[in-house]
Image: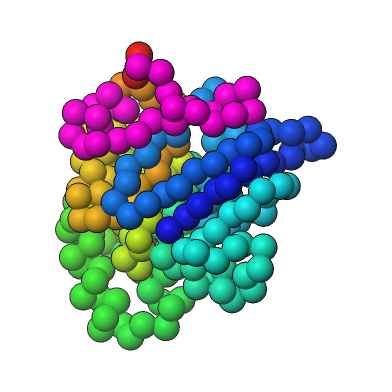
């Protein structure tokens, strides 16, 4: 689905990482850990085609990223849901309208949007907040809304960058349960996080691989996790 083959990336003239190979196969669940500044967010951006590598090859669904047109990349990215570290919403639109934006951009009819949206908001526990404006939402509500927006196009892959970074433990576990449920439905999940307790909680529920990026390399994390 998504493949990185001996990928390197430079930032500000310095090599951030090199020799990184990763294959996100259908139904896999990955955690990505590592110290701040090691390149976790950059690696995620390479996985969903926002950045090109300085060296090596990235393939999105079998196609080399360097050879893909902008339109082809846009189509491929519809199959990849992304939850960013800093959730951005349009404050003048309701929660429901923000979540539905990807469907609207894709040109789906309002009736189709409403049917999918109602079910999705119920799934993330936000049906009662459908008409709320983003500034009134709590951190946990914003993160669940971001997850709903990321999966409303029924992507094959879900990539999340520190999705529980600003949440308390109870809300972190609630969001984790949604991610695990997605994986059990056959979705590939890749989560960047510094929260080792969250990783341990996930490994009790799902078969997850844990990778660590540090010293410009990507490797399997140690058994202490």
- The answer to whether 85 appears left or right of 201 in the picture is right
Q: Is residue 100 above or below residue 128?
A: below
The one of 63 and 185 positioned closer to us in this rendering = 63
Count the marks.
0
Furthest-top residue in this view: 224
Q: Quadrant of residue 65?
A: bottom right
Q: Quadrant of residue 70?
A: bottom right
Q: Is residue 156 magenta?
A: no
Residue 160 x %, y %: 42, 45
Furthest-right residue in this view: 13
Which range of residues does the magenta coloring cover?
Answer: 198-223
Taking the image as drawn, is residue 136 in sight? no
- The answer to whether 146 appears left or right of 182 in the picture is right
Q: Is residue 200 magenta?
A: yes
The one of 105 and 37 positioned closer to us in this rendering = 37
Q: Quadrant of residue 210?
A: top left
The N terminus appears in which quarter of the rendering?
bottom left
Residue appearing at x 54%, y 31% in the figure: 218
Residue appearing at x 34%, y 51% in the figure: 188
The C terminus appears in which quarter of the rendering?
top left
Q: How is the image coloured?
A: rainbow
Taking the image as drawn, is residue 63 in sight? yes
Residue appearing at x 40%, y 44% in the figure: 190
Residue 140 x %, y %: 31, 40
Residue 109 x %, y %: 33, 85
- The answer to whether 215 appears left or right of 157 in the picture is right
Residue appearing at x 38%, y 56% in the figure: 157
Q: Is residue 138 above or below residue 15?
A: below
């Amino acid at each position: 689905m998504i493949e990185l083959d001996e990928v390197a990336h430079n930032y500000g003239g310095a090599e951030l990482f090199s020799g990184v190979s990763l294959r996100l196969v259908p139904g896999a669940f990955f955690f990505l850990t590592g110290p701040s500044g090691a390149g976790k967010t950059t690696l995620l951006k390479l996985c969903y085609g926002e950045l090109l590598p300085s060296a090596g090859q990235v393939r999105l669904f079998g196609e080399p990223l360097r050879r893909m047109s902008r339109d082809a990349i846009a189509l491929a990215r519809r199959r990849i849901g992304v939850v960013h570290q800093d959730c951005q919403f349009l404050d003048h639109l309701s929660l429901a309208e923000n979540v539905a934006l990807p469907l609207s951009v894709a040109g789906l009819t309002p009736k189709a949007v409403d049917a999918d949206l109602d079910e999705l908001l119920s799934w993330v526990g936000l049906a009662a907040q459908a008409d709320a404006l983003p500034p009134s939402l709590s951190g946990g509500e914003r993160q669940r809304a971001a997850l709903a927006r990321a999966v409303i196009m029924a992507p094959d892959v879900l990539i999340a960058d520190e999705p529980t970074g600003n949440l308390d433990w109870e809300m972190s576990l609630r969001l984790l349960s949604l991610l695990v449920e997605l994986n059990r439905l056959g979705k590939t999940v890749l989560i960047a996080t510094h929260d080792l307790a969250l990783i341990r909680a996930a490994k009790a529920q799902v078969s997850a691989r844990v990778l660590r990026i540090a010293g410009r390399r990507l490797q399997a994390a140690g058994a202490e996790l």
